[in-house]
Amino acid sequence: MVESAHSPPVGRFAPSPSGPLHFGSMVAALGSCLSARSRQGRWLLRIEDVDVPRSVPGAAEGILRTLEAFGFAWDGDVIWQSRRTAAYREAFARLEAEGHLFGCACTRKEMADSTLTRDGTRRYPGTCRAGLPAGREARAWRLRVPPGRIAFVDGIQGGIDEDVSAEVGDFVLLRADGLFAYQLAVVVDDAETGVTEVVRGADLLDSTARQIVLQRMLAYPTPAYAHLPVATNGAGEKLSKQTLARSVEGARPAQVLVDALDFLGQGPPPGLADCGLDEVWQWALRNWSMTRVPARRQAPCPAYA
Ligand code: GLU
C-alpha cells in the first residue's frame, strides 16, 4: 500500500529501560506523542530492551507507570524488543542470503587505533570485509555498507548528509555476545509496526543515516525524521543515566509537561501548570507546532539535572 501524504501519522516513543525517565526522555515522549496525536495519528510505545545486559530490572515497569501518571496513553500493546528476536533473526537471514553481511573477528582492542565516529563508536577499517584472516573465527556480523552519501531532511535539524561507508564503515548487526544490535532492531520494529515518523532526541541523529542504509537494504520505507533538541545540565552534558539525571517520577506531572513544552519552544501560557494535567494536554494538543521546536537549546535545565 502506498502511504498517502494525508494518512494519519504513526509515531512512537522507544525508551531503553536503563533507568527511570528523566526530563530529556520526557521531552522525547511528549514531542513524539504530540506530533502524532495533534494530527489524529497513532502513537506506539516500544521498550528497547534488546540490549539485555544494559536493561535494569524493574526500569521498564517504572517507565510505563510514570508515563501513565503523566497522562500518556499509547495505542495497542507495548512492544518489547526482548520478545522480537525472531523478527530480527529473519531480517538478518534475509540480509545474509543476499550477501550483505560478513563475519568479523576483530576485537575491541584490535580496533582501538581506528578513528572515532561522531557518536563515539570506532570506524570499522574493513579488516575482515574480504574474508576472515587465517585461523580466526567470526565474533560479530557486520553489514557491508555500500559506498555513497545518505541525504535526508530532518523536520527540525534540516538537511543532513552522511557517507556511512566512509565515516562509520561496516557496522555490527549481530554482536559478539550474540545479541542483535540496536540499529537492526529499531529498523525492523519501525517498519513492522508501520511507523511513519520518528521523533526522538538529537543525540540519535548520527544513527539515522545508518538506519536508512538498512531500510534500503531490507526494502522498507524510510519514515520522516525529526530530532528534538537535547536537554543538558549546567555543565552542558546531556541529561542521562551517566550524568545522574534526576528522575521525573515524584515531580508534579503538569509542571514537568509545561516545562517540556517550554523547552520545545511551544510557549505555554503562564499559569498553565496550575490548571491541571488535563488542561495541559488539551492546550498542548491544540497548540503543538513542530516548526516552533528549536534545533538546539543553549539554556540548561538545572531543575531536572
Ligand atoms: N532507545 C533509544 C533511547 O532510549 C531511542 C531509540 C529511538 O528512538 O530510535 O535512547
Image (tube, rainbow, N blue to C red):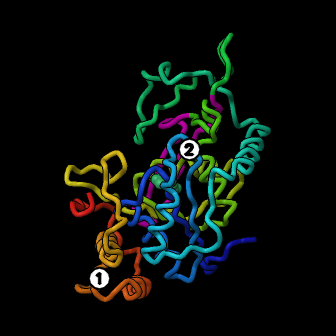
Give the residue drawn at x 24%, y 86%.
271
Q: Amino acid at mark 2?
A: Asp
Q: Is 146 contained in the magenta span?
A: yes
Query: What residue sits right under mark 1 in the picture?
Result: 273
Query: Left of 3 or right of it: where is 33?
Result: left
Is 148 in front, or is 255?
255
Is 226 in front, or is 179?
179
- Which tag, 1 or 2, sits closer to the chain's start? 2
In the rendered image, the residue lying farthest to the top is: 135
Q: Secondary structure at mark 1?
A: helix
Q: Which residues are magenta?
A: 140-169
Callout 1–callout 2 Cβ contact below 8 Å:
no
Image location of residue 98, percent across then percent down: 77, 39
Mark 1: give few (<14), some (14-19) or many (20+) Cα within 10 Å: many
Q: Amino acid at mark 1?
A: Ala
Image quadrant in which you'd find residue 232: bottom left
- Dot label at residue 51: 2
Image location of residue 36, percent across then percent down: 53, 75
> Vertical placement of 76 versus 172: above or below?
below
Task: Please state, as top left, top right, bottom left or bottom right, where the C terminus lies in the image.
Answer: bottom left
Is 98 in front, or is 202?
202
Image location of residue 189, percent across then percent down: 64, 57
Under 8 Å from ligand 1: the CB of mark 1? no
Give the residue drawn at x 41%, y 57%.
20
Task: Please state, as top left, top right, bottom left or bottom right, where the N terminus lies in the image.
Answer: bottom right
**Does the image show residue 283?**
yes
**Does the image show residue 144?**
no
- Dot label at residue 38: none
> Vertical placement of 178 versus 32: above or below?
above
